[in-house]
Amino acid sequence: MVKRKTCIFISGHGSNLKNLIHHSRDKNFPIEISLVISNNKNANGINHAKKYKIPYAFINTKRNDYERKIFLYFKKYRISFICLAGYMKIISKNIISKFKEKIINIHPSLLPKFKGLNTFSRILKNKEKKTGCSVHFVNDKLDNGRIIVKKNFFLNSKDNEKSLKRKTQALEYKAYPEAIIKIFRKY
Ligand code: GRF
């Protein structure tokens, strides 16, 4: 099987990156992680790239230069698929249009509910019965592209932001690889 050369974008902890690295080591998993890009020099996720000897880059310059650098890296590592995993910067329209249906993101809510930041506090405030995570294609509107996989759980009266994060992320580690398999099964 020819694996898609994939770039993962991160900004922070990188637990989804770590999970995808583990999955990608399976010969039947459709992607190979060829590059990790972070906008944040202190992102812990970079340590996962280092551990598995995956090339990585920090890119956080102004718009044109930022795109130019990203495209140079994409060319060098022949990137044809992008996964956003906790990337806190908006991806430019130019990159999105060049990678149409080839950029996906994971979001910690049941989209279209609770787009944007601070999802867990808003979910609690809104007294939601159910929450979860969504993997979706990225288009030029925030957290808005077609949904590939959603997973959910029911809240209980003891839930707080910390427990919601823990439960949501446990589902993310299943949803993200499942979405990737689903996308490439089509082709
Ligand atoms: C995840 O919960 C994801 O839903 C959101 O950012 C978080 C990143 O976590 N987009 P990590 O860096 O993968 O641990």
Image (cartoon, grey):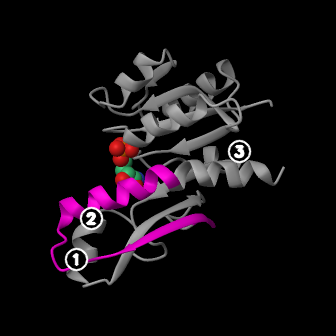
| Label 2 secondary element | helix
Query: Residue 75: x and y, percent?
Result: 68, 23
Mark 1 sits on what residue? 124
Q: Are marks 3 and 2 in contact (CB under 8 Å)?
A: no
Q: Are marks 2 and 1 in contact (CB under 8 Å)?
A: yes
Tell me if 74 is positioned left or right of 40 in this view.
right
Image quadrant containing the N terminus = top right
Query: Residue 83: x and y, percent?
Result: 55, 43
| Label 3 secondary element | helix
Structural crowding at the residue carrying mark 2, measured as other residues with C-alpha within 10 Å and reported as few (<14), some (14–19) or many (≥20):
many
Mark 3 sits on what residue? 98
Tell me if 119 is positioned left or right of 57 in this view.
left
- Give residue 67's quadrant in the image: top right
* Residue 164 covered by magenta stretch: yes
* Residue 123 covered by magenta stretch: no
Magenta range is 145-174
Mark 2 sits on what residue? 164
Q: Evaluate whether residue 187 shows in this view.
A: yes
Residue at image x 75%, y 48%? 184
Q: Amino acid at mark 3?
A: Lys
